[in-house]
Image (cartoon, grey):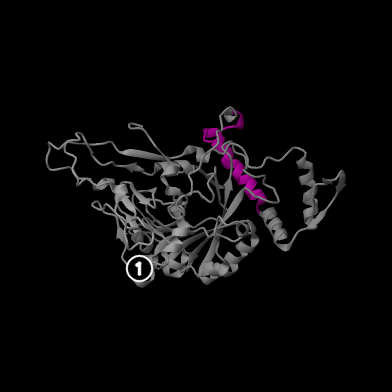
């Protein structure tokens, strides 16, 4: 389970454990024990013929390990290979120290700044220019003042609630004091090269005729499926309904598909295949690519305008009383937009506001709590379609619990950009059993969930995983 501790303030989560509880077992093809009988009929899945009709070149390859059937001849010379198990790279959660460690002498400065913040003025540190010091005063804009006011309201909630969960984590040994890991060798972490630009492929896929001219059914990867074309990937929802992991090769890059998952790889302009499934969902988690100054200056990440986010067809995807959860940055402009414009336009009634608090493995905030620039928390706005009532469960007298306000999700974050903690186990008490779940703007897959986004396979890249030796 990803929930390590659950207390009144909220939950302490183990994101890495959640990923590794997924059955990432890849069953390998039987290996010929003798080379004499190797026939030309054997297929090398990575060397499929190029599809001339595809604008991408080579077709995508699906390695369907569970499609292997034992030969009828018991005397066949194929040797069964043990399944290969994958686990997520633990070093990607190796956050032992805060990202910013405030110096001791800054404490006095911070206390003085708090008084200045009330007047909307911040005194910057004196800067030395050609041997002379000059002091500058910068007046905060309205957005910054709103953020400070908001932080003042939730500060004690964040501090007190996090402390209780962190103390519990230290007692159980899940978190450990810094001196215990100071001697650990923190070697530089090599991240996989982004050689397969998924969002760029989605942009190219818009020119495929099947994207806009044909209504295709869901592509179910069955036991006897061996390949799937790239054109299929970009034009329809793909489902792995088996109990085993499958590996797909897209533009030469390998991605792991967990059991019982489904996904659509597309951007917002090609979301129609998701609607064509005619499914509605009981939970919709949304992580919009919010616009901000750093994103606008960088070409690495795309973003959506508020108008584009409002156009997401949530009313068509949501089942009655659907729980809608939206991740939001600490920018008050975005928070007001969700509460005052976005949710009302989707007929979603706000019922709770939670926070994700990011800590190190020793229980420190990854950023100083009162930092004027970066905060160690992000928000989640929870609401329901229609009436805010408890839901009767099928054939039982039990009811879904009402969603509490001001809860905290505390966890050690992944060092990968925007790899949010899983909400499946946190939300399970607030949805009906067997409820259908959808994650929008997803960057990874989960068993039992439908995931959509133009980077939906990003963190499923095999280079983020390690193959365990047989017997581990």
The residue at the point 55 percent across, 61 percent down is 303
Measured as percent of width and height from the top left, residue 46 is found at 32, 48
Instruction: Let me know if residue 414 is in the magenta part.
Output: no
Residue at the extreme right? 132
- Classify residue 115 as left or right of residue 38: right
Measured as percent of width and height from the top left, residue 136 is found at 83, 53
Q: Quick one: 90 or 199, which is closer to the camera?
A: 199
- Classify residue 118 as left or right of residue 282: right
Which of the image's four quarters has the C terminus? top left
Q: Quick one: 173 or 188, which is closer to the camera?
A: 188
The residue at the point 70 percent across, 53 percent down is 152
Q: Residues within 10 Å of mark 1 (few under 14, many from 20)?
A: some
Label 1 sits on residue: 210
Task: Give the magenta part as a residue range.
Answer: 154-179
Which of the 4 quarters of the picture holds residue 217? bottom left
Measured as percent of width and height from the top left, residue 49 is found at 29, 54
Provide the major secondary structure of the magenta segment.
Answer: helix
- Using the image, determine if residue 191 lies above or below residue 145: above
The residue at the point 63 percent across, 58 percent down is 297
Which of the 4 quarters of the picture holds residue 25? top left
Measured as percent of width and height from the top left, residue 458 is found at 45, 51
């Amino acid at each position: 389970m990803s929930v390590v501790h659950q207390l009144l303030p909220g939950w302490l989560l183990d994101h890495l454990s959640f990923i590794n509880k997924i059955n990432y077992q890849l069953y390998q093809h039987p290996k010929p024990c003798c080379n004499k009988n190797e026939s030309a009929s054997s297929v090398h899945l990575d060397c499929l013929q190029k599809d001339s009709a595809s604008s991408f070149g080579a077709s995508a390859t699906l390695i369907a390990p569970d499609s292997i059937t034992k030969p009828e001849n018991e005397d066949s010379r194929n040797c069964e290979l043990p399944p290969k198990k994958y686990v997520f790279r633990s070093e990607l959660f190796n956050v032992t120290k805060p990202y910013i460690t405030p110096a001791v002498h800054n404490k006095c400065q911070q206390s003085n700044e708090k008084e200045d913040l009330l007047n909307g003025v911040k005194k910057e540190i004196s800067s030395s220019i050609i041997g002379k010091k000059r002091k500058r005063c910068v007046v905060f804009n309205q957005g910054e003042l709103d953020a400070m006011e908001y932080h003042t309201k939730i500060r004690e909630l964040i501090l007190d609630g996090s402390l209780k969960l962190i103390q519990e984590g230290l007692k159980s040994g899940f978190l450990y004091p810094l001196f215990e890991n100071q001697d650990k060798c923190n070697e530089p972490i090599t991240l996989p090269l982004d050689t397969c630009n998924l969002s760029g492929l989605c942009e190219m896929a818009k020119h495929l005729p099947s994207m806009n001219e044909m209504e295709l059914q869901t592509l179910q990867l069955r036991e006897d499926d061996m390949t799937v074309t790239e054109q299929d990937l970009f034009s329809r929802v793909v489902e792995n309904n088996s109990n085993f992991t499958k590996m797909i090769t897209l533009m030469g890059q390998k991605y792991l598909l967990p059991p019982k998952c489904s996904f659509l790889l597309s951007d917002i302009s090609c979301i129609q295949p998701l609607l064509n499934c005619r499914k509605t969902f009981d939970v919709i988690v949304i992580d919009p690519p919010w616009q901000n100054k750093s994103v606008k200056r960088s070409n690495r990440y795309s973003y959506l305008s508020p108008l584009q986010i409002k156009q997401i067809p949530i009313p068509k995807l949501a089942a009655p009383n659907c729980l809608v959860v939206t991740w939001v940055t600490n920018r008050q402009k975005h928070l007001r937009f969700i509460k005052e414009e976005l949710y009302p336009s989707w007929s979603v009634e706000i019922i709770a506001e939670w926070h994700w608090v990011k800590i190190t493995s020793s229980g420190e905030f990854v950023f100083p709590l009162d930092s004027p620039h970066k905060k160690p928390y992000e928000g989640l706005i929870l609401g329901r379609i229609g009436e805010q009532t408890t839901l009767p469960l099928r054939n039982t007298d039990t009811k879904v619990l009402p969603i509490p306000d001001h809860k905290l999700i505390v966890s050690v974050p992944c060092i990968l950009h925007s790899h949010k903690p899983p909400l499946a186990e946190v939300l399970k008490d607030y949805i009906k059993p067997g409820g259908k779940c959808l994650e929008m703007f997803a960057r990874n897959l989960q068993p039992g969930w439908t995931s959509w986004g133009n980077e939906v396979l990003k963190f499923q890249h095999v280079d983020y995983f390690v193959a365990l030796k047989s017997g581990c």
